[in-house]
Image (cartoon, rainbow, N blue to C red):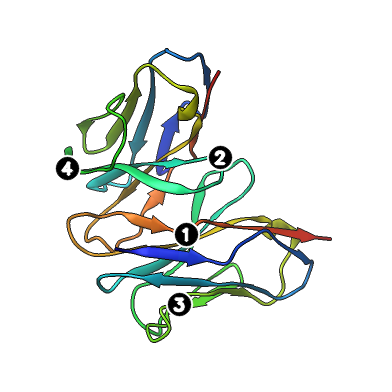
Amino acid sequence: GNSVTQMEGPVTLSEEAFLTINCTYTATGYPSLFWYVQYPGEGLQLLLKATKADDKGSNKGFEATYRKETTSFHLEKGSVQVSDSAVYFCALTLSGSARQLTFGSGTQLTVLP
Amino acid sequence: DTAVSQTPKYLVTQMGNDKSIKCEQNLGHDTMYWYKQDSKKFLKIMFSYNNKELIINETVPNRFSPKSPDKAHLNLHINSLELGDSAVYFCASSQGGGRDTIYFGEGSWLTVV
């Protein structure tokens, strides 16, 4: 089956630190990969996505590269801010009639001033 | 304009009651979803509708009944609410093939007391 594995949280960083949240996947086909973010008390927002191998998704200073050879889609940001504190979800979806997202378990990020 | 909107955002109700959560999308998408987020932030699909037809129905108690009057609306009705139904319920929508981006509403926080 399809699955997404994220690094365990919570992650606590100081402002301006470098962030990496690891994400690996298993899929029966050729997935599209996503990072969603959930700020405290809010809904899910799409952060970035990549639809084919070696694509790099980027948004708001965050980046992730679709690595087919390592089945990974790690999220990175060079300098985090307090406002980046949120829960981050890695997810995949496959083509076909059963359209759905398979999510990782989420990683809580707290950035301290 | 909010792309995917759901109401109510917060709902506190007693065990045994029946409640509904409404969802509307103005993106012109042909597929809508309900996801459940449990207390550990884990997200799992419940239902998916494509052009008003049910295409995904995960293992969900039959007390949960989705209704899609048209392709822009997907409502969730829950009968005989139980304590374990307390969660955040997200409506979502997408267009096109299975790898298209899925857009989420802001969530409905349901608390059963």
Give, as a three-letter code, the residue at label 1.
Answer: Gly
* Circle 2 residue: B39
Label 4 crowd bin: few (<14), some (14–19), many (20+), radius 10 Å: some
Report x, y in % for residue A99.
25, 55
Instruction: Name the element at disc 2.
Output: loop
Which residue lies under the disc numbered 3?
Answer: A72
Q: Position of residue B70 (x, y in %)?
A: 20, 33
Q: Are marks 2 and 3 on the same chain?
A: no
* Number of the front mark, 3 or 4: 3
Residue type at numbered disc 4: Asn
Mark 1 neighbour density, 10 Å: few (under 14) some (14–19) many (20 or more): many
Looking at marks 1 and 3 on the same chain, the residue that comes earlier in the sequence is marked by 3
Q: Chain of mark 2?
A: B
The image position of residue B14, as x and y in percent, is 50, 13
Of the pair A47 and B20, the residue shown nearer to us: B20
Task: Give me the C-alpha separation between circle 1 and circle 3.
Answer: 12 Å
Which residue type does callout 2 highlight? Ser
Q: CA distance from mark 1 to mark 2?
A: 15 Å
Q: Which mark is residue B17?
A: none
Q: Residue at x 42, y 13 (%)?
A: B16
- Mark 1 — residue? A104
| Residue on which the image places disc 4 | B51
Q: Is residue B1 visible?
A: no
The kind of secondary structure element at disc 3 is loop
